[in-house]
Amino acid sequence: MDKTHLNYIQNVFDDAVAAKKVAGLNIAVVHNGAEQGYWQAGFADIKGEVPFKRDTICRLFSMSKPVTAVAAWILIEKGELDLADPVGKFIPEFYDLKVCTEGGRNGKPQKCNRVLTVQDLLNMTSGYTYGAWWDGAPLGEHLTSDLINELNQDVSGENKITTLEVAKRLAKIPLSFEPGTGYAYGLSADILGAVIEAASGMKFSEFLKKNIFDPLGMKDTAFYVPEEKQSRFAKSYIYKNGEAMEEFIYPNLGIQPFMKFQPAFESGGAGLCSTLDDYLKFATMLVNGGELDGKRILQQKTVEYFSEARLSESLQKSFDAGMEHLSGYTYCNLLRVAYEKGRCKMVTENGEFGWDGWLGPYVSVDLKNKLVVVMLMQRTDAGTWEVTRKVKNIIYTSL
C-alpha cells in the first residue's frame, strides 16, 4: 500500500474534529496481515481533555451484529442450528406469530402464513423493525417503540428484563410484513441472541466469551465496562446545530448510557463495548478465513459465504428502498456485502463486507485484497457517514 497516501486520513480526522463534527476517533488499516497505519484525533472526553487513544473503549451499538452473526454460525457449523430452523423451535412463542400491514395503532393483526426462520433473523427479513417513525407506521412498529421505551426505563432502573424475555415479548408483537417477504432493519439480531442462548444452553455473554472473545484475546469486549476500565471509556456526543458537540447521556435501544453494570438484556444487535485492537482481532480473524494466531473460530467456507451471500431480487429492492446510502450493497448474515462496486458511494471491492454502528464505529473486511479496516468514534446518528466514506476512498486508492 501507498503509506504516504494513507496519511491523508489524518487530515480528514483533524478537519472533522476542528469542525466539531465529532469529538474523537481512531482507525487502523491492516493489509496482507501487516498493519499499514494507525491514526487518531480528538477526545474521548471533551471536558476532561482525555485524548481518544488506541485503548479507548467504545460502545459498538450495531457493530455488535457481526459478532452475533459469527456466534450463530459457530452453531450452524456444528449442526446445532440451521438457517431453515423455525425460531419457534428454540422459543415456542414464535410459532404463534401475527402480521399487521395496516397503518396506525388500530390495525387488525392476522396469523402469519409462514414461519419465522433463523435466516430471516440473519438477513433482517423477519418483519421486526426498530419501532415507529411516524403515526401511520404499522401497529407492530408502534408496539416495538413501546417495548424499546420500556427497556430504556428498565436499564435505568430495575434491570430485570432478560435477553430471552425481550424475545418472548417481541413474539407477541405483530410483524410489519410476512417473514421473508421484505427487508427491514431492526431487532432481529436481538432475537437471534436469545436463540443462541436456547440452542447452546448458555447465557449469551458466556457463549461469546467462551467461543469468540477468550480465544481471540478480546479482553476489553463485553456488554458492560467494569469500574477498573471506566477511565478508558469514551463519552458519547451529539452534533448540535452544526456548532458544537454535546454529551449524550440517555439510554438507547435498551442500552445503558454509561455501561457500568452487567445488563439483564444482552443485546445481540447493539449491546457490546470494545476497543480498536479487540475488534481488529475479530475482523482479522475473518479476513484470515476464520482463524487468528492458531485459534480457529469459523471454517474458511463460512467466511467465503459471508462475502458471497445475496438477497433475492425482490428483497434487494426492499433493501435498496430503505438503504439508499448503501447503493451497490446487499445485506445478509447481519452484514452489508458489496456486490456492484460501481454503484457504491465509496471505493470498495465486490465481496467486501462489514457493518457500522449508531455512534459511527465501522468495520470493513475484504477477502480479495486481504484488507481490514476498523474505525471507532462515539457520535450519535453517524453510521456510515462522510468521514467513513472519505477514509474508505483514501484507503482503497492506496492499494
Image (spheres, rainbow, N blue to C red):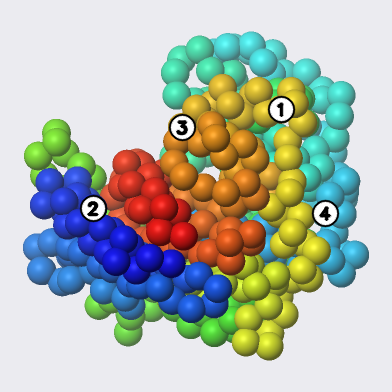
User: Residue at coordinates 58% horizontally, 78% vertically from top-left?
Assistant: 213
Residue 275 image offset from top left, x and y in percent = 40, 72
The residue shown at (44%, 18%) is: 134
Q: Of the residues shown, which amino acid type is indicated by label 1?
A: Leu
Task: Label 3, secondary structure: give it.
Answer: helix
Tell me which label, 3 or 1, sits earlier in the chain. 1
Q: Quadrant of residue 10?
A: bottom left
Q: Nearer the viewer, mark 1 or mark 2?
A: 2
Label of residue 325 in the image: 3
**Kind of residue sitting beneath label 4:** Phe
Q: Check if mark 3's residue and mark 1's residue have beta carbons within 8 Å.
A: no
Residue that carries the numbered disc 4 in the rendered image: 90
Q: Nearer the viewer, residue 121 or 265?
A: 121
Q: Residue at x 70, y 72 (%)?
A: 290
**Label 1 neighbour load within 10 Å: few <14, some 14-19, many 20+:** many
* Crowdedness near tag 2: few (<14), some (14–19) or many (≥20) residues, C-alpha within 10 Å: some
The first of marks 4 and 3 along the sequence is: 4
Mark toward the start of the polypeptide (2 vs 3) = 2
Residue 262 point in image, percent of width and height: 47, 70
Q: Alpha carbon of mark 4 to alpha carbon of mark 3: how far? A: 35 Å
User: Under tag 2, what secondary structure?
Assistant: helix
